[in-house]
Amino acid sequence: MSSTPHTTYLEYQALLVSFAREDFSSQVQEWLHKQWSSDTLLEQAIPWARSIPNIYPDTCLQQWSKYADDNNMDRSRTKDSGKTSCVGLFRWTPCGQYVACVIETDTIVIFDLQQQQHWQTLRSHLQHSIRSISFRPTCSWQLAVGCWTGIAWWKRNQLHWLTWKQHKQVEHISWSKDGSLLASFSSLDRCILLWDVGLSQALVLVKETTIPVCDVSFGVCGEPFLFVGHSSSQYHFTILDTLEWKPQRWKKQQRVQSQCKVAWNEHDSASVAIIASSNQLYALDISEQQLLWTEYISNVPDHAHLVDIVWDPSAQRLAVMLLIPDQEYRTLIALYSTQCEPIFRMDLIGWITGPESPSDHALCMSFQPSSCSFGALLAISWSQGTIQLIPLVFAK
């Protein structure tokens, strides 16, 4: 683990929880305590960090059993197999108070983080095999769901469907910043659609593509862009200008060896995107059409499988989740300190390894949208059915 002047003692404390070598941890903790003992920022940060549950929801499985009983749902398969209910996917509301968890691939349970209790359950017999969920940026109570049967659009407890021909088996969805457009990709008809949600009408943006789409995502600052990562013999990323819908605005098609995912800068006017592919990272300046930075993630094997990449709302921390086959710690999360202005910079802070059990691995992660000004809250869902919350504190 390398040190950086932008990281406080609490951030290292959160990372060191996962290290088994106590001698190494104690030495680093002692050094950091001396380094930051006079930092007034800790007076604010410590109460905030202590107020965050270590694992949330701590009674997720017990609560899910109660919901199943209340709705007379058949839980015999889960009970007989001895497997726990799995939080395979989750998303924060724009306000950051609520988190929606996909449980058993077809039910969405929304929890209140502040009250630490269940708030709402969204379930329909038509909604199954959920692949993607996204809250509408302008409405915390509207949730779009990409699933095997199409696109479900929840408005509180009311369910609406966005339908277009054979646009089912929806793998990816993404809202525009103003919430007026919804992009979706279907693995059945191989189309990328752009939905005007006010009219419930769709425009075919990419028709019957024969190459696999990795991710569809709107940019959030500066000019709006839609990112599409796809492959023929190799993966490459394509960026569309959503003002004129000109394809391949990123003219230098950087080719990569495996599936890629994108994270956008949400904080300032810099149109910067970070793209991860296996164990390699690329930083792109979209407006200037240039590559700012590229790096291999150190000490990660070439056969590592990319799971997720997220950038915190202040653009100061980037987390990259990798699945490492046949290793003691199957999941590795590389944590970077980043800055976009005046020049782009990225430094590896350390690793989050999670539980030692080889049967428990991370599935996805996300930063809370409305974290405090002196830190960010990283949430990680684990295969045993829990969400781990890790506070990261920034120095001024």
Image (spheres, rainbow, N blue to C red):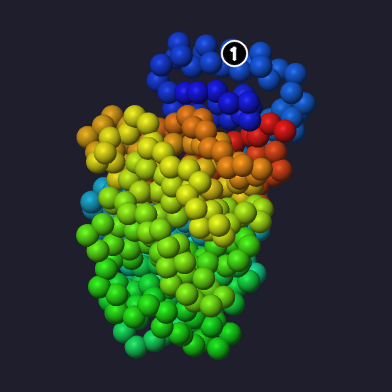
Where does the image place residue 353, in percent across and percent down from the top left? 40, 32
Residue 117 seen? no
- Of residues 85 and 233, the one nearer the viewer is 233
Mark 1 surroundings: few (<14), some (14-19) or many (≥20) residues within 10 A: few
Tell me which corner region of the image, top left, top right, bottom left or bottom right, holds residue 187.
Answer: bottom left
Tell me which corner region of the image, top left, top right, bottom left or bottom right, holds residue 231.
Answer: bottom left
Task: List the residue tagged with mark 1.
Answer: 31
Where does the image place residue 293, in percent across and percent down from the top left? 48, 43
* Kind of residue sitting beneath label 1: Trp
Number of numbered discs overlaid on the protein picture: 1
Q: Residue at 34% across / 29% down in the picture?
A: 299
Where does the image place residue 128, in percent across and percent down from the top left? 35, 70
- Of residues 94 and 302, the one nearer the viewer is 302
Where is 70 relative to 358, above or below?
below
Give the quarter of the figure containing the C terminus: top right
Where does the image place residue 200, in percent across and percent down from the top left? 51, 86
Q: Residue at 51% across / 71% down in the picture?
A: 241
Residue 15 seen? yes
- Of residues 210 and 85, the one nearer the viewer is 210
Q: Residue at 44% across / 33% down in the picture?
A: 352
Secondary element at tag 1: helix
Q: Residue at 34% across / 74% down in the picture?
A: 186
Where is 315 relative to 300, above or below?
below
